[in-house]
Amino acid sequence: MGKSNSFDGLINHLDSMLNSVDDDADEILERNARELTIEAQKNAKSVMNKGYWTGTLARMIEDTKSGHLNYEVTSNAHYSAYLEYGTRYMEPETFMFPAYQKIQKSIQSDFKKIFG
């Protein structure tokens, strides 16, 4: 009977640790998704320099939780892809990828703190 109780205790302890890691990972991903959104919004203003700035592009960049430990940062402006990737008439004016590159280092650093 003592072995069963200690085994149950071990399982409960491991479940608790897993939940703690899940919570920490979710917090890291949520915080970095928000930072990525803010950075992409800043970049959006800098690429819109050939005409006038209405702020639509920046307002259309948003982060959402799309599943367990899964966040998405998207730009819903219909012309986002043209700016990000360019066209045959226009060079790319990237605003999302530089933000991703900047935040990626932060995400890696945060996860190294959890997992050592």
Image: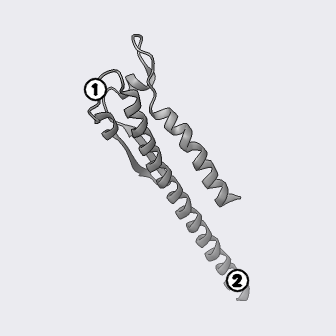
The location of residue 101, given as percent across then percent down, is 56, 37
Which is closer to the viewer, label 2 or label 1? 1
Q: CA distance from mark 2 to mark 1?
A: 68 Å
Q: Is residue 84 or residue 18 the one in the foreground? A: 84
Q: Is residue 113 or residue 43 the one in the foreground? A: 43
> Horizontal placement of 64 versus 15: left or right?
left
The location of residue 31, given as percent across then percent down, is 48, 54
**Looking at the image, which residue sits at the far right?**
3
The location of residue 16, given as percent across then percent down, is 59, 72
**Looking at the image, which residue sits at the far top?**
89
The local secondary structure at tag 2 comes to helix
Q: Is residue 90 above or below residue 37?
A: above
Q: Residue at x 69, y 83 (%)?
A: 4
**N-terminal of the two: label 2 or label 1?**
2
Q: Is residue 41 above or below residue 52?
A: below
Q: Amino acid at mark 1?
A: Tyr
Q: Is residue 66 or residue 105 the one in the foreground? A: 105
The local secondary structure at tag 1 comes to loop
Say the numbered circle drawn on residue 113. Answer: none
The location of residue 107, given as percent across then percent down, is 58, 49
Q: Quadrant of residue 82?
A: top left
Q: Is residue 107 above or below residue 116?
A: above
Q: Could you classify mark 1 by the number of other residues whose Cα lies within 10 Å: few (under 14), some (14-19), or many (20 or more)?
A: few
Say the numbered circle drawn on residue 52. Answer: 1
Q: Residue at x 49, y 38 (%)?
A: 99
Q: Could you classify mark 2 by the number of other residues whose Cα lies within 10 Å: few (under 14), some (14-19), or many (20 or more)?
A: few
Q: Amino acid at mark 2?
A: Ser
List the residue tagged with mark 2. Answer: 6
